[in-house]
Image (spheres, coloured by chain):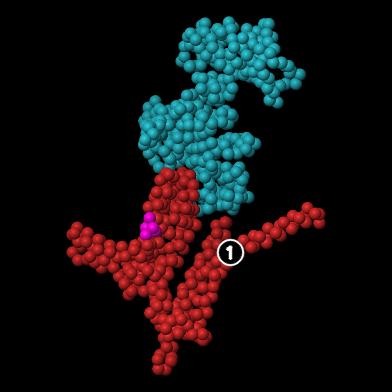
Amino acid sequence: MSSVVAKAGLEIRNVGKLFTQPGKGDFRALDDVSLFIKPNEFFTLLGPSGCGKTTLLRMIAGFEYPTEGEIRLNGDEISDLPPYQRPINTVFQNYALFPHLTVDQNIAFGLEMLRRPKGEIDKTVDEMLRLVKMTEMRGRKTSQISGGQQQRVALARALAPHPKVLLLDEPLSALDLKLRKEMQIELKRLQHETGITFVFVTHDQEEALTMSDRIAVMSAGKVLQVGSPRDIYDHPANRFVANFIGETNFLTGTVLSAAPGRADIKLGTGAVIAAGVPDGMTPAGEVTVVVRPEHAVITDPETAAVKGTVDTVVYFGTDTHYHLKLDSGAPFTVRQQNRRGREVHLAAGQPVGIDIPGGVAQVLRD
Amino acid sequence: MSALQRSTAKRDAGIDRVSRLLTLPSLAIIFVFGILPLVIMLVYSFLKPAAYGGVEWEFSTEAYVSFFFTQDIFDETLTFNPDYLSIYLRSFVFAVGTMIACLLLGFPTAYFIATRPAHQRQWWLLLVTIPFWSNLLIRTVAIMLIIRDEGLVNHWLINLGVIDRPIVMLYTNFAIVLGLFYSFFPFMVLPLYTSLEKLDFRLVEAGFDLYATRGRVLRRIIIPLAKPGIVAGCLLVFIPALGAYVTPLILGGGTHLMIGDLIAQQFGSSRNWPLGAAQALILMSGVLVALFFYARNTAGKGVGHGR
């Protein structure tokens, strides 16, 4: 790819961050991270706390500077620009609303700093208040509105200057479950209506799966996998991703035969299953395969290739989780939807068979 | 009324009585050391001076009249005399100058301390307050030694060849303001530090994120949020600086009088206690009026900002 041609979007190229702490040794927060975030994309940085996702976000915002690599926006290098020269705004985790200003003054702040004409500021503030449904609250102090309303004001404040990229640093973590679900839908709507690129940081895998166009899974300062939610869920590249995103079962087996994209695996129990293979990998010998709990089906122990016994049964309302113990001794979970007239009644200690349909299993890289 | 309610009511009344009793000592202290001296001053200011200090118990407004006017010895006509008022004006200018100097240097100092790692801050604060540990008089004399004609500053400047004749600093207005600044600097830094320390620096980041440059973050975010500390610091410096006594006496050489010296003179060499009391009360009412207008002004602004 030629760097002469300006590429629209946010490009993070071989970015690293080394914190030097006197007396404590160095700490590498980010290690050779490369990402390309397309215009109008809802892109999520997902990972456990301390994985470097917030550091990366702060570098895009301009609060931290990379020690290696560069960040480009629509082809222009922005790595060394101060935050106030980047057309990028942030929704902070704790909202960071200005307590000495009212709701509308908060929203107008960025536009005032850009020295936009008064008429334009007023118009945009009205528009933003409507967009986040806060028109009635415009004269309130930020301490006089609820957490969910503060969240909306923070969004409106960051969207008002029409940034090229909006950064969101775990903006929903302080909200209760119901409000969080509402705001997830709200955020998707806002992103759709404004057409702005959203870079969203979260440690909540469910939030990432439901909202994102693409997800980058991060751990210990590295990007482990980038892909659509479906990609990442169905075809995790390694054990960390498989484990971090959703529940999963790990099985070990030997490769019988491998073709590009798929392989036949002989499990320890003797059963042979067809599994997907990550791009560019040629599996051989001992491998680990993952099977999502909802993809496996409980069947008759007489005919099934994989056999086990029921350990515990946990009822979740919409579905039931069956924690099984395979004959090989490994644990295995099966999740089944509770549909009227199709309930399966299983008791602890009861022998069962497990059917793993072709293609639902996935070989891991490590 | 049930027995339970009755006993609760009785207990409440008992608690009320006990808490009223418990406030008595503090009320007594306020009365004896706060209100009583003011009343004595007010009464004395309307009496006649006795020849060797003290007062004669005879009603007179002479003290207030002589504050503004001089009486001709022969025909007893009153002519307006701004001498005392000019001393008040000078004190006011010195106090404002001291306050501004303290604010201009105190704000960066407090900001610096507030942005240090938490475990370092107490040491920096200690450094600011160390001068407090020695006597004001000794500190003031020390300044005198530093800035006098043969003092450290002139000595160095001459040795370095910057000047060839000493700069006269002692016994000037500059010396007084320098001394006041040095004495009251910690009173500015401590309240400023308290409000800057509470400042959420994520708000500063939010300001940068919303296109505010450093200067505008300072003006639009940090200063408005530190305002309670700025106001407290300014009052804590301005009011004592206005009535300062030792510093102007020593560093001004007795030629540049401030209010404090003037009042002290009435109770000392001039032996005119009523005039001294009147001068002190005029100073106090001036400060009270200023504070009143300030309070009303800021309260009004608060409404305008939707507070």
Tell me the subunit letter for badge 1: B
Mark count: 1
Question: The residue tagged with tag 1: helix, strand or loop?
Answer: helix
Residue A60 seen anywhere in this rendered image of the structure? no
Q: Is residue A223 magenta?
A: no
Decide: is A318 above or below A22. Answer: above
Q: Is residue B271 left or right of residue B157?
A: right
Q: Within the image, what quadrant is residue A339 found in?
A: top right
Shown colour of chain B: red
> What color is chain A drawn in?
cyan
- The front one of A266 and B64 is B64
Does residue B7 appear to the left or right of B201 in the view shown?
Answer: right
Residue, x 48% and y 41% (percent of image)? Answer: A89
Residue B290 seen: yes
The kind of residue on which mark 1 rests is Pro
Identify the image quadrant of residue B70: bottom left
**Mark 1: few/some/many CA within 10 Å (<14, 14-19, 20+):** few
**Residue at 57% in and 42% down:** A151
State the residue position of label 1: B25
Q: Residue at x 66, y 60 (%)?
A: B18
Q: Which residues are magenta?
A: B130-134
Residue pictured at 70% horizontal, 59% vertical: B14
Residue B133 lies in the magenta stretch:
yes
Placement of A338 over or under B264, stated as above or below: above
Q: Position of residue B132 (x, y in %)?
A: 39, 58
Quarter of the image with the N terminus of chain A is top left
Residue B272 versus residue B107: which sits nearer the camera?
B272
Label the magenta part by its dominant secondary structure: helix
Give residue A296's position: percent from left, percent from top: 63, 15
Rendered position, A114 above or below B94:
above
The location of residue A288, given as percent across then percent down, is: 52, 14
